Image (tube, grey):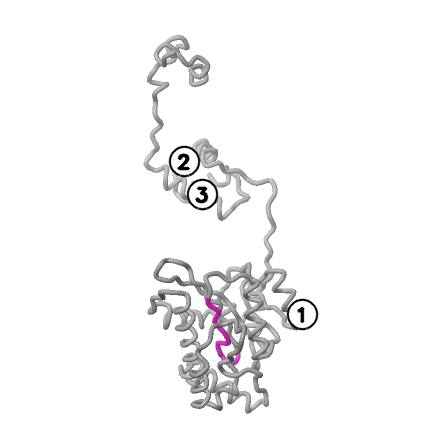
């Protein structure tokens, strides 16, 4: 009908229907969506995201299993309506981790043996995202750096690690999840050149990076949930204050309620290992925004023994 009217633009709908023998009610019929259509489509799309290689018949079977009273023809109609299809070519995903790299099976045994890092997200009052890269020594529980930026790519991760390696010394291993910033070829190549071995945990198993997950949980509970950042600079300053508080004043329950810096001093004296870095390294080109130099000097006067321990 529509094709006919396009070719004969001066013909009315009434006359076209009469010539073709089609009732006008059929031509003017508007499809009404059923009440149960929306949850059915939502569940179908959720199944497709979870099983991208399943066709509409297999998805129909899963829908029936979930309690939807629907036949396969209706699922096919909705499938076509949503523009779904099983791609002929599928992109292979890189899965570098396994459970053997978790914090239980591969535990840190001394300072700079295993570090871990991960991201935490928050936002400023204008709704813009703020990203936090946290780096921790799993043995001493010291927070070595918290990089705060709007976005952090693998290049920024390399620059942050480069700075921390210079002032602290490189670890033997570094543990992380399979985030795109951490599995980037450039980062893996740079870590290999630095002599650092990567420990990628099993995908979907954040508990295998438990030390960093625990620290990030404390960071969110004790700082992020109670602070309203008005700017990125404020977020950097407040976060650095928290990092110093965490390392030097906050008792850590898993260290016998010693601070991480004090525990590092004890361990260093017992094993003869002393980190290359000061507790609060400051210098030009610093990857993480630090406190003013005067405040840092006052901190060193108050706690000289902790300074020798590391970050």
Kindly report the distance in space between the C-alpha atoms of the residues bearing marks 3 and 1. 44 Å
Query: Which numbered disc, 1 or 2, marks the residue closer to the eye?
Result: 1
Residue 243, x across and y down, in percent: 44, 76
Mark 2 falls on what kind of element? loop
Q: Which residue is mark 1?
A: 193
Q: Which mark is residue 45?
A: 3
Q: Earlier in the sequence, mark 3 or mark 1?
A: 3
Residue drawn at x 36%, y 39% as measured from the top left: 38
* The residue stretch that appears in magenta: 139-148
170 relative position to 33: left or right: right
One can see residue 211 in this view = no
Q: Main secondary structure of the magenta part?
A: strand
Query: Which numbered disc, 3 or 1, marks the residue closer to the eye?
Result: 1
Residue 94, x across and y down, in percent: 60, 56
| Up/down of 217 relative to 257, above or below | above
Q: How many neighbours does mark 1 have within 10 angstroms: few (below 14), some (14-19), or many (20 or more)?
A: few
One can see residue 143 in this view = yes
155 relative position to 234: left or right: right
Residue 10, x across and y down, in percent: 39, 12
Kindly report the distance in space between the C-alpha atoms of the residues bearing marks 1 and 2. 58 Å
Residue 263, x across and y down, in percent: 48, 86
Q: Which corner quadrant holds the N terminus?
A: top left
User: Quick check: marks 3 and 2 in contact, CB under 8 Å?
Assistant: no
Q: Which residue is mark 2?
A: 70
**Dividing the picture into quarters, in which one does residue 159 lie?**
bottom right
Out of 219 and 138, give the one closest to the viewer. 219
Mark 3 falls on what kind of element? helix
Q: Which mark is residue 219?
A: none
167 relative position to 40: left or right: right
Q: List the single residue furthest toward the top.
A: 19
User: Quick check: marks 3 and 1 in contact, CB under 8 Å?
Assistant: no
């Amino acid at each position: 009908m529509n094709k006919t009217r396009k070719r004969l633009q001066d013909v009315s709908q009434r006359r076209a229907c009469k010539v073709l023998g089609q009732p006008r009610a059929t031509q003017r019929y508007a499809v009404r969506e059923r009440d149960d259509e929306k949850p059915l489509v939502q569940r179908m799309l959720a199944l497709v995201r979870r099983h991208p290689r399943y066709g509409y018949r297999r998805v129909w079977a899963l829908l029936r299993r979930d309690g939807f009273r629907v036949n396969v023809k209706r699922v096919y109609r909705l499938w076509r309506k949503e523009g779904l299809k099983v791609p002929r070519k599928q992109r292979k995903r890189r899965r570098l981790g396994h459970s053997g790299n978790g914090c239980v099976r591969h535990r840190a045994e001394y300072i700079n043996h295993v570090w871990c890092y991960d991201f935490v997200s928050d936002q400023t009052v204008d709704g813009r995202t703020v990203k936090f890269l946290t780096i921790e020594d799993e043995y001493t529980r010291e927070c070595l750096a918290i990089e705060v930026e709007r976005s952090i790519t693998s290049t920024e991760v390399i620059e942050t690690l480069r700075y921390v390696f210079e002032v602290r010394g490189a670890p033997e291993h570094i543990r992380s999840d399979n985030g795109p910033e951490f599995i980037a070829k450039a980062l893996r190549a740079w870590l290999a050149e630095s002599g650092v071995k990567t420990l990628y945990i099993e995908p979907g198993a954040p508990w295998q990076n438990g030390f960093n997950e625990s620290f990030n949980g404390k960071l969110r509970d004790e700082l992020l949930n109670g602070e309203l950042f008005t700017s990125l600079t404020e977020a950097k300053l407040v976060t650095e204050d928290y990092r110093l508080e965490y390392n030097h004043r906050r008792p850590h329950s898993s260290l016998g309620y010693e601070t991480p810096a004090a525990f590092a001093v004890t361990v260093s004296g017992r094993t003869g290992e002393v980190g290359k870095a000061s507790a609060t390294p400051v210098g030009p080109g610093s990857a993480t925004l630090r406190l003013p130099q005067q405040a840092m000097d006052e901190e060193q006067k108050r706690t000289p023994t902790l300074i020798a321990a590391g970050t």
